[in-house]
């Protein structure tokens, strides 16, 4: 029914309009005493007000009407002349001598216009609401993407729901931590009784979702956040509209959330609520995996440390009895206990050779475990690499000579000094040259060379390229080149792996521990340098290492 | 004859050191733990001490420090024997006052050479 209010002191006018609008489509009412006007419209806002322009205090009354019902159509009933000031307030004008059809059509046109405007305004409001909600969803999902902390994710979820839905209370059960926690985010303070009721409700929800599992109400931890603690919620809270969502991904359950609001939730609210609850599940899953990863890593690190410690302890325990064996052999070999026969000497020297080998293995194991445990002490000092090359050449030239090998050096002149641990690099170079001597046959050459090189000119073969990155600036490069048996391409990388050579019968024959190259690799990494190898089977090998020129 | 005190909880090692040093005409006294070692050092005031690091009761570093801070014994050369164990690593860097270090397993002839360097 379209409500029409007619305001006039003129009874004949009233009768005329009652005749027109007092029919079934309209709900016609009239007032002749303008003092009653405000009370009348206050309780029952009309769609259309006809206002007799002859009414006293017309403009004041009109102002008051506009304050109460701004969307009501106001039509003035005038005589022939229209007061220009009224034009500002009027939706339309009619005259008392206008034909009835014209008056009703004026009313209908205005009604249609009013409906159209109302629809437009309501669509606009819906659009603004959707936009706001979309923004809330967007900012919430951005927040989700920014953290791997499960508690924060749950907090962001609740904040997101508050932004999008302005709830009165949310009751969230989080199963993310070590124990279940009930998080209550409330607009107003909650009494102990109300909290107990909410806990009970949570347990009931839990039991209905997770059949066969139990949530102990006595030990359930509650975290409460109250926005306005001065006011208080009562049990009428449970008469509010509510929504419920499970937070889960596949078989993993992170809990559930229940939300209460004084006004009813719309279907859009429900979609938005479910979307946020679903959106949080994936980052929660990632956070769980991330946490597991960190824990596994910590375990692995601990294992690695234990392993290093174990090696260190075992090495120490091996070293002491080895010393006793070695000392006894030395005493026997020295002839202090009586003359040593030729065959006895053969077996004594066999035993001594193997004691030496065992002792080298223990030293290597210790070195490696120390480096890996980060306990190796380095003594970095400015020095010239050519000095180290000189030492190694002097130390090993006799051995090389005895095997009929030609050990030469080719050092770059005027190499600048750089920071390194001379003792450790001597260890590396000794290992490389000893290997070259072991695996090269009589009459062949072994060359140690050094040069200054820029990172862009360093040539590393495809096998080692993925391993060696981040080289930049100037380096000092040392190369040990031999004409020995070489290493098969498929074994090249493995040569730098711990224990790789232990399986290799060749290395066993040559008496290596298989740890020399892995140790060299670690020592050079500690120098921020690198080591690699070019090799061709039966042609020879070239081992390179570089250290940065500060 | 010059007196040498050997302190090591490994009897076999003490035995072999004693054998070669006696062959080289030194008189040897032996102790098998730190406490006895320290007591014996003060009692006989040897010309040189061969001292193991890791020992029960008092470790070698501590004995060395105690003797080197004492005017009566500070001139006795100390040859420290280490097995490069983890416990020893932790102690490295501490001022021990030892005159020489040697790592297990060592060459007996080298020990004799070092001893002779100090005592002849």
Image (tube, grey):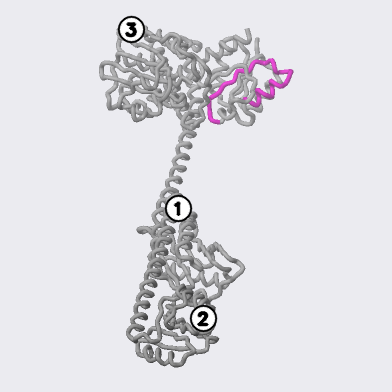
Residue at the extreme left? A538
Contact between marks 3 and 2 (CB within 8 A): the answer is no
Q: CA distance from mark 1 to mark 3?
A: 72 Å
Q: Write down the chain letter for disc 2.
A: A
Q: How far apart in space, not on screen, are marks 3 and 2 (Cα)? A: 128 Å
Q: Nearer the viewer, residue A378 or A313?
A: A378
- Nearer to us in this view, A114 or B15: A114
Give the residue at x 43% y 20%: A474
Q: Secondary structure at mark 2?
A: helix
In the rendered image, residues at marks 2 and 1 fall on the same chain: yes
Q: Secondary structure at mark 1?
A: helix
Distance between the alpha carbons at the discs numbered 2 and 1 = 58 Å
Residue, disc 1: A143
Near mark 1 (Cα within 10 A), the count class, few <14, some 14-19 or many ≥20, is some
Q: State the image quarter where residue A256 is shown.
A: bottom left
Q: Nearer the viewer, residue A445 or A13?
A: A13
Q: Between A370 and A143, which is closer to the camera in this rendering? A: A143
Q: In the image, which residues are magenta? A: B60-86
What label does residue A404 carry, if any?
3
Quarter holding residue A304: top left
SS label for mark 3 = loop
Q: Specify the label residue A58 is tagged with.
A: 2
């Amino acid at each position: 029914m379209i409500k029409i209010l007619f305001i006039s002191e003129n009874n004949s006018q009233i009768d005329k309009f009652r005749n027109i609008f007092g029919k079934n489509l309209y709900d016609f009412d009239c007032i002749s005493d303008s003092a009653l006007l405000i009370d009348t419209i206050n309780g029952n806002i009309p769609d259309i007000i006809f206002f007799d322009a002859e009414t006293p205090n017309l403009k004041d009354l009109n102002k008051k009407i506009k304050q109460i019902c701004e969307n009501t159509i106001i039509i003035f009933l005038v005589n022939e002349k229209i007061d220009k000031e009224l034009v500002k307030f009027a939706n339309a004008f009619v005259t008392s001598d206008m034909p009835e059809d014209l008056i009703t059509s004026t009313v209908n046109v205005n009604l249609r216009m009013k409906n159209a405007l109302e629809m437009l305004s309501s669509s606009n409001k819906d659009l603004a609401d959707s936009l706001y909600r979309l923004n809330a969803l967007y900012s919430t999902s951005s927040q989700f993407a920014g953290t791997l902390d499960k508690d924060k994710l749950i907090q962001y979820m609740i904040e997101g729901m508050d932004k999008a839905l302005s709830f009165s209370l949310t009751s969230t059960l989080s199963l993310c931590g070590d124990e279940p926690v009930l998080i209550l985010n409330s607009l107003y303070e909650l009494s102990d009784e109300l909290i107990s009721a909410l806990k009970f409700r949570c347990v009931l929800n839990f039991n209905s979702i997770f059949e066969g599992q139990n949530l102990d109400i006595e030990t359930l931890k509650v975290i409460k956040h109250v926005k306005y603690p001065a006011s208080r919620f009562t049990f009428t809270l449970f008469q509010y509209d509510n929504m419920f969502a499970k937070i889960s991904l596949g078989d993993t359950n992170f809990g559930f959330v229940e939300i209460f609001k004084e006004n009813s939730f719309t279907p859009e609210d429900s979609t938005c609520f479910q979307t946020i609850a679903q959106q949080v599940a994936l980052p929660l899953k990632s956070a769980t995996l991330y946490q597991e990863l960190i824990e596994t890593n910590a375990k692995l690190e601990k294992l690695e440390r234990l392993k290093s410690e174990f090696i260190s302890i075992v090495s120490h325990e091996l070293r002491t009895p080895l010393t006793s064996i070695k000392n006894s052999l030395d005493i026997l070999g020295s002839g202090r206990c009586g003359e040593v026969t030729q065959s006895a000497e053969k077996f004594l020297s066999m035993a001594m050779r193997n004691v030496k080998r065992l002792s080298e293995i223990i030293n290597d194991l210790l070195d490696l475990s120390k480096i890996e445990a980060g306990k190796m002490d380095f003594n970095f000092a400015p020095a010239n690499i050519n000095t180290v090359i000189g030492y190694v050449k002097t130390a090993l030239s006799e051995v090389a000579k005895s095997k009929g090998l030609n050990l030469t050096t080719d050092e770059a002149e005027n190499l600048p000094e750089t920071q390194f641990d001379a003792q450790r690099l001597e260890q590396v170079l000794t290992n490389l040259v000893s290997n070259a001597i072991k695996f090269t046959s009589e009459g062949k050459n072994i060359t140690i060379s050094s040069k200054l090189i820029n990172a862009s000119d360093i040539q590393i073969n495809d096998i080692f390229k993925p391993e060696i990155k981040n080289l930049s600036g100037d380096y000092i490069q040392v190369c040990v080149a031999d004409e020995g048996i070489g290493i098969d391409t498929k074994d090249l990388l493995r040569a730098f792996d711990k224990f790789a050579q232990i399986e290799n019968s060749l290395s066993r024959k040559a008496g290596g521990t298989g740890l020399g190259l892995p140790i060299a690799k670690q020592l050079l990494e500690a120098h921020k340098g690198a080591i690699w190898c070019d090799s061709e089977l039966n042609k020879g090998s070239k081992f390179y290492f570089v250290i940065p020129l500060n | 004859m010059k007196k040498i005190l050997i302190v090591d909880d490994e009897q076999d090692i003490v035995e072999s050191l004693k054998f070669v040093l006696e062959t080289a005409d030194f008189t040897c006294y032996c102790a098998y733990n730190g406490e006895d070692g320290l007591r014996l050092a003060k009692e006989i005031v040897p010309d040189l001490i061969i001292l193991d690091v890791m020992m029960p009761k008092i470790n070698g570093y501590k004995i060395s420090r105690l003797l080197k801070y004492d005017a009566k014994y500070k001139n006795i050369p100390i040859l420290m024997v280490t097995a490069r164990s983890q416990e020893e690593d932790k102690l490295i860097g501490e001022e021990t006052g030892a005159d020489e270090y040697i790592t297990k397993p060592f060459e007996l002839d080298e020990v004799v050479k070092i001893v002779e360097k100090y005592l002849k």
